[in-house]
Structures are given as C-alpha cells and as structure tokens.
Amino acid sequence: MNTVEMMKKLQDGALDARLTALYGKEALAAQKARYEKAIAAFAEIYGTEHEIRLLSVAGRSELSGNHTDHNRGCVVAASIDLDIVAVAAKTEGTVVRVKSEGYPEDVVDIAAFNAPREDRFSKSDAIVAGMCAGLAKNGYRVGGFSAYTTSSVLKGSGLSSSAAFEDMIGNIQNYLYNDGKIDNVEIAKIAQYAENEFFGKPCGLMDQMACAVGGIIAIDFADNSQPVIEKVDFDITAAGYNLCIVNTGGNHADLTPDYAAVPAEMKAVAAALGKTVLRETDEETVIAAIPTLREAVGDRAVLRALHFFAENRRVVAQKKALDAGDLAAFFENVRASGRSSFCYLQNVYTTKNVAEQGLSLALCLAERYLQDKDAAWRVHGGGFAGTVQAFVKSEHVDGFRALMDGVFGAGACMVLRIRPEGATLVC
C-alpha cells in the first residue's frame, strides 16, 4: 500500500494491536503519532506513489558481560522499547537513499561502493554500503530503496544506535528483496562485518545480535560463526523492577580509539600466549605469565584480561540466577561487574579528558541512593561516556529519576521495558 493507504490504516486503528505488542498499551498513542509523522516525512521527500513497508529494530541493553564478546566470551543482553523505525520502499536500480531524521540524506550506489574505503570510515554511508555488500557476499538479494528513519535510540547513549541502524539496513533488504527469509542472527553477523570492515570499528557481535534477535538472550561466542543463543524467560517488570538507563550526556564520537584499545589489549595478552583471543586460554595461564606479560603488553592489558575471565564467570552465574528467578544473586553480580569494569577494565572515563567523568558521577549517585534498596547499578555498554544502568524497584523509580534528571538534565533517566522482538516488519 502507498503512503496514503498506510496512513489511513494506521489512523483507523488497524495497527493498534501490532504497535501495542511492540511498545506497550500506555505508549500506543505516542507511537501512532510517531509513525504518522514518519510516513508523512517519507511522502514529502520521496513521494506518495511508492508501495511502502513499516519496519522496526530495537535498541539493546547489555545486562551482563561488559566487553567480553570481542574475545569470544559470553553475554546476557536484551532488546528494549527504544527503537529505529523505517518507512521504506523499493526503487529501480542500485541506489539506496536513507534520510534519517536530523541528519543529511545518505545516497549510496551499492553497485559502486561495494568494498571498504578508508576515507568513508566512521560515516553512515559506509554502514549502508557494508550491509548491502555483506548481504550480497552471503548470497542474498539486494537492491535499491528509499527510506526515512526516525530513532529513539539516542546516538552515543550505549543503547547501540549504530548496531540498530546496521540491522535496520539488513531488515529493509530482508523484507523488500528476500521475502523476510533471512534469519535475524544472520543479519546481525553481517552487521558486525559492516561495522568492522566498512565503518572501521573493531566491535564484537553482541550489540548487533541483541538488537536483532529480541527479548532477553544469553549468547556464547566461543564459535563466532555459530554463536549459541538461548532465550531467557524472565520478566523484570513483573518482578517489580524497572530497567533504568541514565544518559550522562557524554558523546561517543571521539572515543573510537578508547573502545578499540580494549579488544586490542585483550588480544595482545592472548597473542603473547600464542593464542588469538582470550577465550582460547585461561585465567591461571595468564596469572602464571604476569611477570612476562607486564613487560610485553603492560599492566592495563593484564587487568583487562583478568576482567574478561571474571566477567565470563559472572555471565554464567547471572543467567543461572535469572533462570531460577533469584534476583538477589543476579544483582550481586551486576554490582560486581560494575566494580570490575571501573577498576580493571577501566572503561568508565577516558584518560584523554579526566575532568569529564559523567559516568563516574552517575555511578556514585546511584550507589548512594540505591545501596539500601535491593537494587543494582553498573556502567552500561561500551563505556567511556554515555550511560549507566540500574535495576530499580518500581516504588523507588520516581526518586531515582528525579535525582538523575536533576544532575544530568530532564529526561536523562529513561525507564525502559524489554520487548520480545528485535528486527521486525511492522506492516
């Protein structure tokens, strides 16, 4: 159906059940208005005659496993109800046009831009090109399309806006050209390829996987080509808690070297032991080699390696705790993960600007407010700037939000729900 027909279907309530399943009943009116605005924007830019599809890709929250995936470790992650929405339509030829709200339009001829270009590293058009090249390389159909996207996944927020965007390009190609038959796990793998090779960022696979698959999932990346994914059937909201993400206002834009140093230093420890990644060795071997490793790779690399092994154990314990409904054990390990990330992984602030420590401040305030309230808190996502995560009892959410909003600005504390679907077709 074209934009006029889709708008009428939306306004008549034919999509109410679908939107409620994705966002919750209380958010229905706001989401309908959001989708209407997106359809109108698409029509204004690309015209009303195209047959359009509505698509959504969730943001993600890492619940367990901080900086483990890139060394083939384990994580627990969840898709959330902040997402990227796209209005998309097939076009003739090989040109892809993507207008993201608030940003210039990306125009990519995917037949011409089909190999990595260093001059386009860190640019959004490289993600578009990389996703299409990765899909084609893996035997899937790709073609031209026009899309308008709008996102509630804040850039630089630690909720994986880049991974969600990558998955969205794959999601669009999946439903426009492949009848929706590409598995979301496959889309996530191709998204990692696009970010590594075309965008120039050596990320792991957790972000893309959590955004694409949906719900709470435990992932073991021991074999990166065939990660083991298990659904975790636990409802945090039903247990009386909210997942709160506090955006401290830091920007990830200039922090790629900080992020890149984490996997690089972990892999340097592995390489010094004749291995490729830390998952191929073990903690006792690393400890025995510390005198040599200090000289070869430095103390911080050793500390980050020790964090990796301890964090992997915590992931196993946290999945077990969620499976058993043991929130006390889960929260104990969340707090331990936060301490390890601060002290040993050292990803709470950048050493390039030690005066700016929004994450440190937010963690300090969270501990002060929540320490006697059966709660948990930690750095969230890649770190260095961006967000902290807290699990807060429903009766304490208003006070926690008021504290954080008072320090970091109105709306800094986001109260989220975990949604069951990741990358999906809405209509």
Image (cartoon, rainbow, N blue to C red):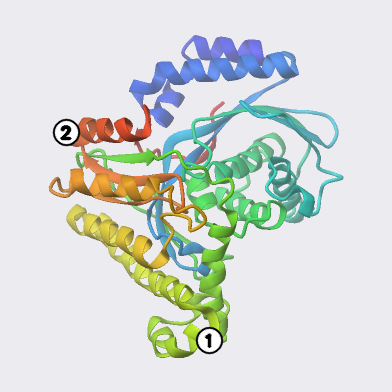
Q: Where is residue 42 in the image (x, y as percent from the top left)?
A: 67, 19
Residue at screen point 46% across, 48% down:
385
Most extreme residue toward the front is 355
Residue 215 visible in rendering: no
Which of 34/176 is in front?
34
Eyeballing the image, is 151 above or below 306?
A: above
Q: In this view, does 228 lie to the left or right of 264?
A: left
Measured Cα–Cα span from mark 2 to mark 1: 50 Å
Residue located 24% across and 57% down the image: 330
Counting residues from the N terminus, which is met first, the one under dot 2 or under dot 1? 1
Residue 361 x, y percent position in the rendering? 33, 46
Quadrant that contains the C terminus: top right
Tell me the quarter of the picture where residue 142 sits. top right
Question: Residue 103: percent from the left, percent from the top?
Answer: 65, 29
Q: Name the residue under label 1.
A: 273
SS assignment at label 2: helix
